[in-house]
Image (cartoon, grey):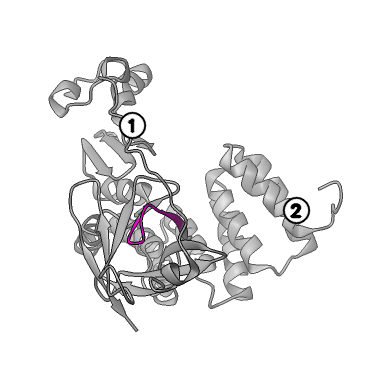
Amino acid sequence: MKAKPSLPLAHNGLGLFQAATGRAEACVASLRQAIAFGPLSAPLNAFLCYSLCFTRRFEDAIIAGRKAVLGAPESCLAHVCLGNALVYQGQYDDALIHLDEARSLSHDSKHALGFWAYACAMAGLREKAEQALSKLTSLPRHEYVPSYFVGLIHLGLGHTDLEGHDEGWRNLALCFRNGDGVLVLTNSSNGEGIFKPLVEALLGETGFPFDWEGYTPYDKLPPLPKLKEHKPVTLTAEQLSRLAGRYALSADIVLTITVENGRIYIREGDEDKQEYLAESPNDFYSATSTDECSFKPETGPAKVLVLHLDNGQNPELKRVP
C-alpha cells in the first residue's frame, strides 16, 4: 500500500484481508478505493457487490453487481455475486437468471450450484432446491463442498434442528419458528465439541438433545488418537512421471496428477492443487491433510489411482486420456 498506493490490486488485497477478519465496512472502503483506480474492473465490482451484502446495503450491492456483469458478461463470479445480492432483496426471478448463467459458465460448479439452490429455496422452488441439496450432499467425501451452502439451503427450506458432517467439517443449524436461527460452521473434525457451550452461551438452555446427538463438550472428550506417522522418501523423475495424467471416477469427478520440480500434485477440476509426498514408489500422502492415495500397477505407467478415505472406503479412479 505504501509503495504503490495507486495500485488497485493493493487495495483489493487489503479489502480481502479485512473481509477475512470480519471488518466488512473497512473492506468496502478498501474496495471502493481500488475501484477508483479501476472503475470498469469486473472482479473488483463483483467483490464490492458481495462485500456490500455483509453491510446490508443491498441496493448498492446490486448496482455494483450489474456493473460487474456489464463489464464481463461471461464472468461466473460477476453473475454469482449479483444473483446473491438480488436474493437478499427478494428479487428471485432476476437472481435465478444470473445464477443459471453462473452454473452454465462454470459447468455447474459446486459454488454456483450452491448459490442457485439457496435462491431456489428462498423462491419457493422446493423440489429444485432439494434436488440440488441431494446432489451436493451425495458427492464423495474427498470432494470439497462448502458447508455454508448446505446450511443455507437447509435454512431456506425451513429445516430445523440440523447438523452436517464432512471430512474436516462439523456443523449445526438451529432454526426457530420466528424466523431466527443459529448456524455453527467449524473447520475441524472435532468441532461438535463446542456446540453445547457455544449455543448455551448465546441462547441459554435450549432443550436441544446434545447428549442424545453425541455432541460431547470439548472439555469432556477423550484424548485424540495419534495421527499416522509417515516417512517421506525421494523418488526419481522417472518414478514420478509414470504417475502423471488424468484419472476419473465418473464424468464429473476427474483428478489431474502433475509433476513439478520433483514434486507431485493432485488437482480436482478448477480447485487448488494439493501436494502429495511419497512414502513408496506407489503410496502417497497429503502434505496438508490426512488424505492418502496409491497407484496401480506397481510398475509401468499407472492405470489406477486409489483414494484411501478416512471412512474406510477406497474408491478407484481409472486413467483417462
Mark 1 crowd level (few <14, some 14–19, many ≥20, 10 Å Cα):
many
What is the number of the mark on residue 94? Answer: none
Question: Which residue is under mark 2?
Answer: 10
Q: In x, y percent, where is residue 235?
A: 45, 61
Q: In x, y percent, where is residue 184?
A: 35, 34
Q: Residue at x 33, y 24 (%)?
A: 194
Magenta residues, start to end: 275-283
CA separation in Å, label 1 and label 2: 35 Å
Q: Residue furthest left?
A: 212
Q: Is residue 136 visible?
A: no
Q: Is residue 277 magenta?
A: yes
Towards the viewer: 106 or 101: 106
Q: Residue at x 44, y 76 (%)?
A: 105
Q: Above or below — where is 107 with respect to 60?
A: below
Marked residue nearer the N-terminal end (1 or 2): 2
Question: Which residue is under mark 1?
Answer: 191
Left or right relative to 32: residue 183: left
Quadrant of the rendered structure where residue 213 is?
top left
